[in-house]
Amino acid sequence: MSQIHILDALVADQIAAGEVVERPASAAKELVENSLDSGARHIDITVGDGGLSFLAVHDDGRGMDREDILLSVKRHATSKIERLEDLMRSPTLGFRGEALAAISAVSRMQIASCQKGAAYGYRVHIDGGVSSEPQPCAMGQGTDIQVEDLFFNVPARLKSLKSPTAELGAVQNTLQHYAVGYPQVAFKLTSGGKVLWQTPGQGRIEDIVVQLFGQDVAADLLEIAWSGQGMAISGFVCPAGRHRGTRQGQSLFINRRWVTNWALRNAVEEAFRPNVPDRRYPYFCLWVEVDGAEVDPNAHPTKAEVRLDRERIIAGRLYRAVSDVLATHSQSSPLVLRSSVAETLQRAPSPAHGGQLALTWEQQETSPPEAGPILHQEYRELVPLGQWQAKYIIAQGPLGLYLIDQHAAHERVYYEEFRKKGHDILLSQPLLIPYTYTCLPGEWAKWQENRGMFAEMGFDVDEVGGTTLLVRALPQGLSSPHGDSGGIIRTVLESLADSEQHQGHPIFWTQEARYAMAACKAAVKAYRALTLEEMQTLLDMMARTEDPRGCPHGRPTTLHLSLEEVDRRFGRRG
């Protein structure tokens, strides 16, 4: 007896659906791509329970007639290609004819569509892959698709999904790429009866960035435009000084298709590398246009990845285009030296005589650390020579040359001060001028889950529309520098977004971690120009700390180069 048999068509469809539809965000992606391919100028997305119970996409595209509606939910039914050659030059986002078939196989779906000029449209119901007969319905031009009870007949997949807020965050994150990539299309995302964000569809990328990331990010956009060698690169990046702990602010498009290409993404991040700390990521939205014959869009079941014929060449050109723009808008300061050797050897005032990093204290609502006894004489004997790249202090001492990371060193000073103050740093402190912060998709989901925790920690935060928060008060030791619109709110939300344990994140279960985070926010940042007096003051502060060798996160504060080492490297014998 034969052991091999042909699978039932319904079972085969459900298995195939697993390749295309992984979660509600996957379904939203496929439906929105169909709307864009139909020429829609307005796309409304409505989500219930993160898309688990309800997901609807309405557009004003070309629409379908009765026959097309029936065919649209059949596997491998498509209007995009007819021959294999068409696959390599398809200008559309969808082409396999699997999206609606896959979604309808694992949900209860309703499709209503009407073509331009038609007196009425047609509506069809598909329950677990089984279609009803189309019925006439009154509606305007476009298509309305409603998906209910996603994965109701695939319990294993349903159990593997995350919480409704986490799934909503994934839907938001997916849709933001299309909103950025298609600024000429007006998008609106609604959840729980509340409009989370909507875009005007006027074709201005700046308007989209304001809605999704906030005014402060939009104000910093640097434009990129380059063409040659059979390709064109366009888009925007933010300066290196504006970065975050996740990649949610990054969008990459190849021939108008949003993709995940590690080689190209890494090329962009490498251009930022000299000026962005480890595990921090830049903002960018970039379009790469190449000949369609050079792109294979059929390399991934969900079309999230593509193969490129000249991937290394394109990556190199992308790196150069971003590097050139960053170089023309550099925030770094050149090395500044004293005017004479005599002045170099002259000591600057100590904190006891008024040299208190004046630039930094003016920007803090936190008092500067108090002066204490000298614990490390070697730091007391250092004399600053200048500042390199607005990040490192160059100093000389009896034992050689020193490079001091200004942020790490100042962080260590604050950390020890906060440990002395103890729980007082977490008392709520009202802000003189409240500020707003626009959450990214993953951050908004974490805010929804953990807003009670924020209140317990001393935050006073309100929702003021869409995904924007109004911050009225912060824990005293976690005050944000003036001008840092995200501040500690962004830091905590990024930490929560990276953690699967939510309240188990170290920030919330050890006091030491709270002090470290408070010190990080209070300390002077990289790319902040310091005067020689401020540099000397910081060195004197380090001489008073218990352990000046590293910041509370484990990074070294100081690199030492002895005269013998310098002589050896220059080939001298001493």
Image (cartoon, helix red, strand yellow):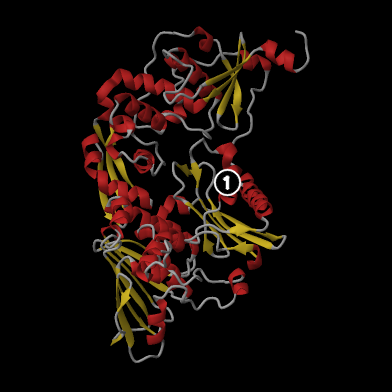
Q: Measuring from the top left, give residue 425's x and y in whole percent.
A: 28, 27
Which residue in the protein does label 1 denote?
A: 266
The residue lying at 44 percent from left, 75 percent from top is 40
Horizontal arrangement in the rendering, residue 84 relative to residue 32 (left or right): right
Instruction: Please identify the quarter of the rendering in which residue 212 is found.
Output: bottom left
Q: Can I make out residue 200 in this image? A: no
Q: Nearer the viewer, residue 350 or 224?
A: 224
Q: Secondary structure at mark 1?
A: helix
Three-letter amino acid code at the position of disc 1: Asn
Which quarter of the image is occupied by the N terminus? bottom left
**Callout count:** 1
Give the residue furthest to the front.
1
At which x and y percent is residue 18? Answer: 39, 60
- Rendered position, 66 above or below 95: below
- What residue is at 41 percent from the left and 75 percent from the top? 74
- Name the spot of residue 378 as percent of width and height, x first: 53, 9
Where residue 462 sits in the image (x, y, percent)? 25, 48
Mark 1 surroundings: few (<14), some (14-19) or many (≥20) residues within 10 A = some
From the viewer's perspective, tell me whether residue 163 is left or right of residue 522.
Answer: left
- One can see residue 215 in this view: yes
Above or below, comparing residue 24 to residue 133 in the picture = above
Above or below: residue 212 compared with residue 133: above
Tell which of 67 and 270 is nearer to you: 67
Q: Nearer the viewer, residue 292 or 247?
A: 292
- Residue at 41% in and 34% down: 363
| Quadrant into which the C terminus falls | top right
